Image (cartoon, grey):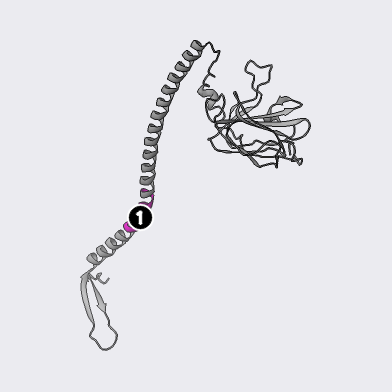
C-alpha cells in the first residue's frame, strides 16, 4: 500500500510561453489554511446577518428610552396641571361662596371610568351598517373611545347621550343628512350643534371647540359640522353626542336606525 503524500504542490500555469511556477506545501498546512478561510467566510456571513438585527434592537432601545423620558416629562406636567386645577377650584369655590352663588364643580371621573373604553373597538367615525336612508343618523360622529355611556332618567347618574374622548380639533361628522336646527353656546354643553333629520329625529353634538356650520344650513351625512373641544362643563376634551326621537334621548350605541346586516 502506497504511503500518503505529505506534500501538495500548487502550480501556477500562465498563458503563453511564460515559465510555470509552483509551491510545495505540506498537506496539513494546506488543510489548515482552507479550514481557516472557510471559518473566516462563515464568520463574516454570520456577523453581517446578525449585525442588522443588533442595530435595529439598539435603535429600538434608544427610542424606548427617549419615549420613557418624554412620558416622565408629561407626567410631571400633568401633576403640575392637577395641582393648579385643584388650587383654581378652591379659589373659585371661595369666590362663589362669598358672592352667594350656588355652583358646584363637576367631579373628576375615576380612572376606572375614564379609561374603561380604551380597549374597546367602539368609536369609528360614521360607521354605518345596512341603513340606506342617509337622512337618519347612523354610526358615530368621531374617532375616539367611549368615556361615558348613555344612562336614562331612571338611572341615578342620568346621561342623555354618550361621551367620546378625543383630541381637541378632531373633525365632528354629521351622522345623517339634515338641516342645522340650532347653533348656540350652552353653559353645560358648551358650543353645541343640533341637526334636524326629519320631523321627529335630531342629533346633538356638544363641547365643541369650533362650529363649522350655521343655522338653517343643509348638511350631508359625513360632512364636518364642528371641531371637537372642551367647552362648557367638561373635565377633559371629548364630544357629547345625542340622538333624540320626538324629543326623547335614546342610546346612540343601541340606535334603531343602525340596521344589522
Task: Give the x, y percent position of residue 46.
Answer: 35, 55
Residue 18, compared with residue 123, is above or below; it is below
Task: Give the x, y percent position of residue 75.
Answer: 41, 29
Quarter of the figure with residue 20? bottom left
In terms of secondary structure, what is the magenta stretch mainly?
A: helix
Task: Give the x, y percent position of residue 59.
Answer: 37, 46
Q: Which residue is label 1 attached to?
A: 46
In terms of depth relative to the viewer, which is nearer, 50 or 84? 84
> How many numbered discs sit on the rendered protein?
1
In terms of depth relative to the viewer, which is nearer, 121 or 206? 206
Residue 32, compared with residue 78, is above or below; it is below
Quarter of the figure with residue 158? top right
What element does badge 1 sit on? helix
Mark 1, Cα crowd under 10 Å, few <14 / some 14-19 / many 20+, is few
Residue 45 on the magenta segment: yes
Q: Residue at x 38, y 50 (%)?
A: 53
Which span is picked out in magenta?
43-54
Q: Residue at x 22, y 78 (%)?
A: 22
Task: Give the x, y percent position of residue 14.
Answer: 27, 83
Q: The N terminus appears in which quarter of the rendering?
A: bottom left
Q: Is residue 165 left or right of residue 204?
A: left
Amino acid at each position: 500500500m502506497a504511503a500518503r503524500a505529505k506534500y501538495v504542490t500548487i502550480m501556477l500555469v500562465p498563458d503563453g510561453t511564460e515559465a510555470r511556477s509552483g509551491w510545495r506545501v505540506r498537506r496539513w498546512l494546506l488543510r489548515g489554511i482552507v479550514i481557516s478561510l472557510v471559518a473566516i467566510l462563515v464568520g463574516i456571513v454570520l456577523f453581517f446577518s446578525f449585525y442588522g438585527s443588533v442595530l435595529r434592537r439598539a435603535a429600538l432601545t434608544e427610542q424606548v428610552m427617549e419615549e420613557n423620558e418624554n412620558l416622565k416629562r408629561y407626567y410631571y406636567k400633568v401633576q403640575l396641571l392637577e395641582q393648579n386645577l385643584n388650587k383654581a377650584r378652591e379659589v373659585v369655590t371661595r369666590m362663589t361662596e362669598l358672592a352667594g352663588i350656588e355652583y358646584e364643580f363637576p367631579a373628576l371621573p375615576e380612572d376606572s371610568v375614564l379609561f374603561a373604553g380604551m380597549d374597546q373597538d367602539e368609536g369609528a367615525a360614521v360607521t354605518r351598517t345596512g341603513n340606506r336612508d342617509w337622512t337618519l343618523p347612523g354610526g358615530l360622529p368621531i374617532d375616539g373611545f367611549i368615556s361615558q355611556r348613555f344612562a336614562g332618567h331612571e338611572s341615578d347618574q342620568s346621561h342623555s347621550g354618550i361621551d367620546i374622548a378625543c383630541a381637541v380639533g378632531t373633525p365632528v361628522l354629521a351622522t345623517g343628512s339634515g338641516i342645522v336646527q340650532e347653533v348656540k353656546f350652552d353653559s353645560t354643553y358648551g358650543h353645541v350643534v343640533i341637526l334636524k333629520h326629519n320631523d321627529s329625529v335630531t342629533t346633538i353634538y356638544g363641547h365643541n371647540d369650533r362650529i363649522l356650520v350655521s343655522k338653517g344650513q343643509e348638511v350631508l351625512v359625513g360632512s364636518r359640522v364642528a371641531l371637537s373641544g372642551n367647552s362648557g362643563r367638561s373635565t377633559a376634551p371629548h364630544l357629547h353626542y345625542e340622538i333624540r326621537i320626538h324629543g326623547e334621548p335614546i342610546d346612540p350605541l343601541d340606535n334603531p336606525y343602525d340596521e344589522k346586516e
